[in-house]
């Protein structure tokens, strides 16, 4: 089965503290992994994808195929990082293209 | 460009009715995907269309159907509505299909009574 899990529903950290949002996936093959973010009253938007290997807004994520993880990290959290974060994978199944989103983690950065 | 637009914003239906949701992609985008997001959960993939052809389908019953028009806009149809169909329905567009970056619309909130 293709699945994405995010163990934390809510993560609270203080401004300036490091952040790690966990994501694990199950997929037989080589999926593409993404992190999407939804700020308050805004649309869901792409934050980063593993193939681009970019750092966006100070966030990075490394695909660990051995542990089937794609954790999102930022060394110093900012208050404006407070948002809902979804890990997602893109792959293929019997019916063609497939996308699977995790349940999301709400990040709250405290002043 | 206003980005991806969806209509209507909100909709209230009763069990057994059918509903049509509409989506206009970003200009130049040829692919549209539909998602269902139940409160407290992540979006669940329903369909992806590219160049008017279905390119992917999630685990949804046949009551759910969609199509894409020559101008790349799309409709999602749900027949014989159930209470459990109450959700936010999201549309996302991308330049081409596959796993290209998706740009999401604001969603249509469907309530089934």
Image (cartoon, coloured by chain):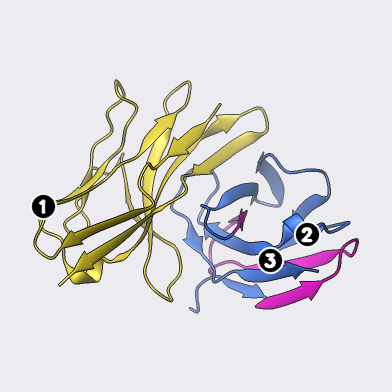
Badge 3 element: loop
Can see residue B8? no
Task: Kindly report the distance in space between the C-alpha atoms of the residues bearing marks 1 and 3.
Answer: 44 Å
Examine the structure image and report whether residue A85 is included in the region drawn in magenta: no
Task: Kindly report the distance in space between the C-alpha atoms of the residues bearing marks 1 and 2.
Answer: 44 Å
Q: Colour of chain B?
A: blue
For the colour yellow, the matching chain is A
How far from the left and from the top, in percent, is residue B110?
A: 71, 68
Q: What residue is shown with label 2?
A: B83
Task: Kindly report the distance in space between the C-alpha atoms of the residues bearing marks 2 and 3.
Answer: 33 Å
Quarter holding the C terminus of chain A is: bottom left
Whether discs 2 and 3 lie on one chain: the answer is yes
Badge 2 element: helix
How far from the left and from the top, in percent, is residue B3?
A: 50, 73
Whether discs 1 and 3 lie on one chain: the answer is no
Q: Looking at the image, which is closer to me, A33 or B60?
A: B60
Quarter holding the N terminus of chain A is: top right
């Amino acid at each position: 089965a293709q699945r994405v899990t995010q163990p934390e529903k809510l993560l609270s950290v203080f401004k300036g503290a490091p952040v790690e949002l966990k994501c694990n996936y199950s997929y037989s093959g080589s999926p593409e992994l993404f992190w999407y973010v939804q700020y308050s009253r805004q649309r869901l938007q792409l934050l980063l994808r593993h193939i681009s290997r970019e750092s966006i807004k100070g966030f990075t994520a490394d695909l660990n195929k051995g542990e089937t993880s794609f954790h999102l990290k930022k060394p110093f959290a900012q208050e404006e990082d407070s948002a809902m974060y979804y890990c997602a994978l893109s792959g293929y199944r019997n019916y063609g293209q497939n996308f699977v989103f995790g349940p999301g983690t709400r990040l709250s950065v405290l002043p | 460009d206003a980005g991806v637009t969806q209509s209507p914003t909100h909709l209230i239906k009763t069990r057994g009715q059918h509903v049509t949701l509409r989506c206009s992609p970003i200009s130049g985008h040829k692919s549209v995907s539909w998602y269902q997001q139940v409160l407290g959960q992540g979006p669940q993939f329903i369909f992806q269309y590219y160049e008017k052809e279905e390119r992917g389908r999630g685990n949804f019953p046949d009551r759910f159907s969609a199509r894409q028009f020559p101008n790349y806009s799309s409709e999602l149809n749900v027949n014989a509505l159930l209470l459990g169909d109450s959700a936010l329905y999201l549309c996302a567009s991308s330049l081409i299909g596959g796993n290209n970056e998706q740009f999401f619309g604001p969603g249509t909130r469907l309530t089934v009574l």
